[in-house]
Structure formats: C-alpha cells, structure tokens
Amino acid sequence: MTKLTKELGLIRRIRTAEAGRPGAAVRGVVLGIGDDCAILRPPRGHEVLVTTDFSLEGRHFRRNWHTAESAGHRTLARGLSDLAAMGAKPLAAFLSLALPPEMLRSAAGRRWLDGFLAGLRGLAAEFAVPLAGGDTSESPSDGVLADIVLVGSAPAGKALRRSGARAGDGLYVTGWLGGAAAELAMLERGEGRLAKRGRGGKLAVPNPHPQLYPQPRIAAGLALVRRGMASAAMDLSDGLSSDLAHLCRASGVGAEIIGSALPIHPLASKAGEEDALTLALHGGEDYELLFTARTGTRMPRSLGGIPVARIGTVVAGGLLTLVDVDGRRRRLKPGGWEHFAAAK
Ligand SMILES: [Mg+2]
C-alpha cells in the first residue's frame, strides 16, 4: 500500500459492514481484514473453490459508459458468477485495486472511487459475502485495475463441472440471453440511461440493466447442486456460442441448439429477430448459467427463482449446430456461424 492510498483509508473503506468490525464474527471468516492473512473456515464436509477475475478499465468497463457503481458491481458480479457456475456458496471476497494517481488526488476521482465501492458493497450485501482482505496501490498506468478473488464452498465432490455432459443430455439456460450486449450497444450509441443503482430482488422478470448490473445466479447454482440435477455447468461470460464450445470440448461432445427456444432478453428483442438471435448467441456478459441434465430429468420451470429454458440437446461428436426457425441447420462457431455446405 502506498502512502496516498493509506491516507485515504482505502482498505478500511472497502470493508463491508459485516466484516468490518475487528473481531466481528462472520460465518466462514474466522479472521478478516487487519492481519497478514485472512482465516477462512469452510463448512464441515465442504471443499473450497477459488476464482480470480481482472476488471480493467478500457477492457471490462469504460468510465464514460459504466457508472462507478456499475463498475464496482460488475467487478464482484464476475467472480460471483464463476462460483454460481460450479454451484458454490460464497465464503469471502478479496479485492486488489490499482488506481491512477490523478484519481487519488482529485475530488472527482475520489467520488468515482466511492461510487465503485458502493456498487461493490451493494452486491456483496445482497449475497452476504464479506470482503475479507485486499490491497491497494497507485497504478503506473492511467486506468483503474481491479482484481477480485472469490472463495466459495460446495459439498465435497458435488461442485458442478464443465466435463460431465453426455450425448442425449438436455441443454438448459437460466434467465435471458443477449440483454447485456444489447444494453452495451445502447450505451455505445449514447442511448442508454446510466442507471446509478442495481435492482436486486425480483428474479422472475428480466433484469432491466443486464450490462450495468448483471445478477449472478448463485441461487440457481446452489439449487442444481442440492437437487443433483446437472451433469455439467458453466456461466455465460463470453457468449453462448463460445461458452457452449468450452463446455462441449471439456465433455467431449457436441450440441444442437434450437434457435426459437432461446430465451431472448427484451432489450435484445428490440433489435429485430435476426439481430436478437445474434445477440443471444454471441453477445457476452449475460452471466446466466448454461447446464446439461440427463434425459428424463424432470426440470422445474425455475431454479432459485430464475426461469429455466431448455434450448437444445447434447449430441455425440464435436459439432455445434443451430436449427433456425425455418428448420435450416447451421454450423455454430464461437462468435459466428456458417451454413453447412449443400453437398453435406
Ligand atoms: Mg466462468
């Protein structure tokens, strides 16, 4: 920690209320901020899961498109979504921040930082995840660098993996697709309203700000583990076509997607049918869960309060196929598609 960041009491300010008081007992955190390490205690019979994500200004957020609150929210949401993907319950978060010197010295910069921390803390409170440590530094570059580490726990041997899908399994997603990319396009065109706060709460309806305030699907991931329903799972960060390819490669299978079965986010629907399909297939950052379940599994209509849609079937071989509304089959590639050759 540099002198300047120390003066700002950054570490003190990134503590969440529940982990903030010295000696405060937080479930899972034996010792939080204030010593050389945090001490965590996972529930008995559980394994520990760890994920780390960079959020870099200019790459993962833009200070002119994303509000400070949104940038903070998104930084934590990305890590929480990875825990959700494996059906883990959050135990603690660790935040490292590198901030440009001009930001630390200007009132506007400090306001941005306060907004960033408020956005992050708001989502942390929603999921009761304590911030148990972190580090701050002046950045040698002129952009903000945030690194979030999330630690979670899952019953031993039960965490969801990408590698368990088999031919014949049903393919499912939670929530709605394409909304985050549609909202990003609106922000780029200067049409989006820069909403200051996240929404929280209502999970059964589409999130009005899927790009600014994505909602990690922790409850759905926990429900999948509890019910033992998923054969494979992951979260959608890069876009369905890319992420499905990752899951299929890990499982050694292919998949057939029914275009008309994709749950399209209302913001994406506005773009028209063809563009909506493109956004749903290739737009990233929806942070929904993609999972598979054995044939015959009685899938509920919602998991953890979030609607679930069957979008296709796992098949043998490595090919990803999209069946469109007219019954035409296209080969789905990460970020795009191509028509099958007529001779095939
Ligand atoms: Mg992920």
Image (cartoon, rainbow, N blue to C red):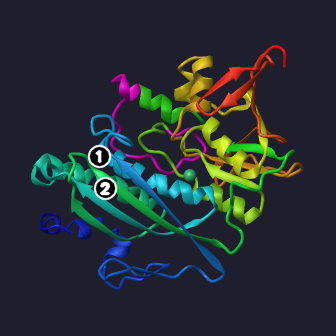
CA gap between label 2 and label 1 equals: 9 Å
* Front position among marks 2 and 1: 1
Magenta segment includes 298: no
- Residue 53 appears anywhere in the view: yes
SS class of the residue under badge 2?
A: helix
Residue 43, quarter of the rendered image: bottom right
Q: Is mark 2 within 8 Å of ligand 1?
A: no
Q: What element carries label 1?
A: helix
Q: What residue type is labelled 2?
A: Ala
The C terminus lies in which quarter of the figure? top right
Q: Where is residue 334 in the image (x, y as percent from the top left)?
A: 62, 34
Comparing 311 with 139, the one in front is: 139
Q: In which quarter of the image is residue 16?
A: bottom left
Residue at 36 percent across and 41 percent down: it is 61
Q: Earlier in the sequence, mark 2 or mark 1?
A: 1
Residue position for label 2: 118
Position of residue 137 in the picture relative to residue 220 (left or right): left
Tag 1: residue type?
Ala
For label 1, the residue is 68
Residue 265 in view in this figure: no
Q: Where is residue 289 in the image (x, y as percent from the top left)?
A: 63, 48
Q: Quadrant of the N terminus?
A: bottom left
How many labels were placed on the picture?
2
Rendered position, 173 above or below 64: below
**Rendered position, 110 above or below 335:** below
Q: Report the side of 75 relative to 21 (left or right).
A: right
Label 2 neighbour load within 10 Å: few <14, some 14-19, many 20+: many
User: Where is residue 181 shown, x and y percent of the image?
Assistant: 49, 32
**Residue 203 lies within the magenta run:** yes
Q: Where is residue 343 in the image (x, y as percent from the top left)?
A: 84, 15
Residue occupying the point 73% across, 44% down: 172
The magenta-colored residue range is: 186-207
